[in-house]
Amino acid sequence: MSIAMTREQERDFAEQGFIVLEHFLTSEELARLSAAADEVVARIQKEQGLAAKTHFQVRNALAQHDAFLDLVDHPRMLPLVVDAIGWNIQIRTTHLDYRPPYPRDMQPGAVGSGRGADQEAGYRNVVWHPDLASPELFIGPSLDGRLPFMEIKVFYVLFDMTESNCGNLWLVPGSYKRCPQELRDMEYQVPAEQALELRLPTGSAVLWRTATWHCVGPNQSPRTRKIMHVGYHYRWLRPTDYIQQDPALLARCSPIRQQLLGALPSGGNPLGENPEVAPSSQYWLTKDADDVPLRAWAEARAGAKTP
């Protein structure tokens, strides 16, 4: 039973692989997140001696500013996340994508082709791809060659993305059901009628299966592309951005937030009660309900929704 998704959203998520939530963030949330993005980027640029127009990603962004940390259990988004992937989850990645306008003389290739000057200049994710499908990870990890359902992300829009060619996210609806090999056989040339360019107002959010084929279009606008991503996957998978979050950070988090940050809120041994003789990962077979407080949270909300 869903906690928050409407039937239309459930259908869109099942058929297309994503749902779009326009104007999701309040004006106060948006202002705080946008200011945090500028603050974090300016600090890193200064620390690393980077030019102001440098394009880069900030990984494990939740540890860089509390505005980003507060997104992992956003009270209006978390119910949708649990509807999409369940309660036995943690954060795989949080990353801020900061992409100033392209230089005027830069010529990008066709969208998603990776055959332009932007690819050569190191701009990330300008080639069509599903996440978690690289040669180092999963290629054909199932009998039919499709990617298993491992992860969802929430994509928060912190700038005006209502026009084309401003670093828009492009998606191929329903493509999470298709084999990554098909995309390789197509030489990453997706027919225009299959592709969708998301043109979204500031403060919008997209909740999506990251196995959906996607890419980032060129930013030929006068605006800086500021996007915050929060990725959730199952607790028995290993995160990408961290091995363990800073204990000082975890200490000031709620039990649900601790679960989402890959910790055990009970403080118990990750290998169970008898780790010397019978080790048992508590991320696989959780014996202590206190380690997954999101379960009781979700069940309470599902029960409250029951007529």
Image: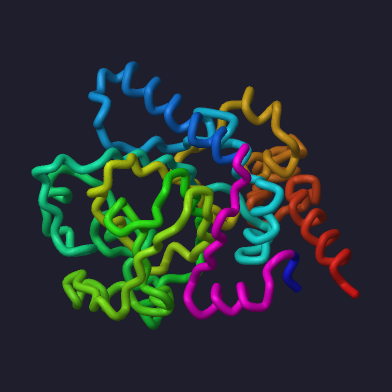
Residue at image point 44% right, 62% down: 210
Query: From this viewpoint, which residue is outermost toward the right?
Result: 307
Horizontal arrangement in the rendering, residue 150 relative to residue 249 (left or right):
left
Side of 57 relative to 272 (left or right):
left
Q: Is residue 173 magenta?
A: no
Residues 148 and 188: in front is 188
The colour mode here is rainbow
Residue 5 lies, in percent from the top left, at 68, 68
Name above or below for residue 63 compared with residue 240.
above
Q: Residue furthest bottom?
A: 144
State left or right for residue 179 relative to residue 272: left
Foreground: 186 or 159?
159
Give the position of the N terminus as an image quadrant: bottom right
Residue in the picture at 53% in, 61% down: 207
Is any part of residue 134 visible from this angle? Answer: yes
Up the image or down, 212 lies above or below 242; here it is below
Residue under the image location 36 percent in, 70 percent down: 196
Tell me where residue 23 sits by quadrant: bottom right
Q: How many marks?
A: 0
In the image, is residue 239 above or below residue 55?
A: below
User: Where residue 162 appears, x then y in whole percent?
Assistant: 40, 56
User: Which quadrant would residue 126 be assigned to in this image?
Assistant: bottom left
The magenta-colored residue range is 4-28
On the image, the x and y values in percent for residue 111 come to: 22, 63
Front position in the image: 84 or 227: 227
The C terminus lies in quadrant: bottom right
Horizontally, is 278 left or right of 122 in the view?
A: right
| Residue 277 visible in the snapshot | no
Residue 163 at what x, y percent from top left? 34, 57
- Name the quadrant containing residue 213: bottom left
